[in-house]
Amino acid sequence: MNDARIRFAEAAPAGQSFRPRSPRLTDHPFFAWAGIRSPIAQHTAAEHDALERHARGRKSLVEIGVAEGASAVALRGGMDSQGALYLIDPFHLSRVRALNFLRRAARRAVLDGSAKKIIWIESFSQDAIRDWRTGIDFLLIDGDHDELAVERDWSDWHPHVERHGVVLFHDARLFPGGWTSPDYGPVRFVDRAFRNNPASSWKIVEEVDSLVVVAKTEHVSA
C-alpha cells in the first residue's frame, strides 16, 4: 500500500513525453530531514507497491542505492518482522559532507517509528561485498546506473541470493510516459542479460513501470 508521506515520481500523461520538472529549493534533502516536506521518491507509486509486495515476508533484504530512503520504506513495510534490511549507500554526493542532509533525510524516513532491524552500510557496493557472508532473499539494485556498474553489482551480489530469492532492477525498463531511454545502463543490462538471453538461468517474472523483477528459472511457475 502506498505511503502517503512519500512524494512519488510520476510518468507523463498518455500521449505525452516525460519532462523532468524544474528543481525547487525545497527539493534539497535538508527540507526532508527537517520534516518540512515528505521524502522524494525516485520511483512511482505502482513501483512502491511492487517493492513492498516482493519484500513481503523476506528475512534478509539488501538495497543498493538508498537516496532519501523512500524505497527502503517500502521494503521495511513488507519485510518479515524478524528480518534484517541492509541499506548500502556511501552518501558521497553531499556538498557538505559534515552535514550530509541526504543521509540524515534517509535515516529520518526509514527509522521513523520502526522497530525492525535496519543495518546501514555507508560504502560503495563494490566495497561492501568484500566481507559479505550473509544469504539474501531480496536484492534491489538501484545504485550507479552506468551499464558496467549495474553488471558489476549483479555479478558481485547475485551469488549470495538464495534459491527462492528475487533480484529487482530499478530504471531498467521503458514504459509509457516514463523517464527511461534505451541507452540507460539498467535498461541495456537487463535487456542483454535477461530479456534477450534465453540461456540465462534467471527469468523476468514481473515488470512494473521501470522496475524489473527476476528470479531463478527453476522457481518460476510455467
Image (spheres, grey):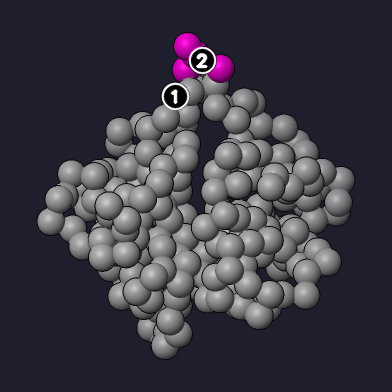
Span colored in magenta:
13-17
Q: Is residue 137 above or below residue 173?
A: below
Q: Is residue 80 above or below residue 133?
A: above
Q: Residue 71 appears at what percent x and percent y?
A: 61, 54
Crowding near the residue tagged with mark 2, few <14, some 14–19, many ≥20 C-alpha atoms within 10 Å: few
Image point (20%, 47%), residue name: 192
What amino acid type should be assigned to the residue bearing mark 2?
Ala
Real-space CA distance between mark 2 and mark 1, rounded to the nearest whole angstrom = 7 Å
Image point (72%, 32%), residue name: 24
Q: Secondary structure at mark 2?
A: loop
For marks 2 and 1 on the same chain, the one whose residue lies earlier in the sequence? 2
Image point (32%, 56%), residue name: 221
**Magenta stretch holds residue 116:** no
Q: Secondary structure at mark 1?
A: loop
CB atoms of marks 2 and 1 within 8 Å? yes
Q: Residue 220 appears at what percent x and percent y?
A: 31, 58
Residue that mark 1 sits on:
176
State whether residue 194 appears in this view: yes
What amino acid type should be assigned to the residue bearing mark 1?
Pro
Q: Residue 181 appears at what percent x and percent y?
A: 36, 32
Crowding near the residue tagged with mark 1, few <14, some 14–19, many ≥20 C-alpha atoms within 10 Å: some
- Pick the front one: 97 or 53: 53
Q: Is residue 14 above or below residue 208?
A: above
Residue that mark 2 sits on:
14
Residue at the far front: name it.
Answer: 222
Secondary structure character of the magenta stretch overall: loop
Res 175 → quadrant: top left
- Pick the front one: 53 or 109: 53
Image point (61%, 36%), residue name: 9
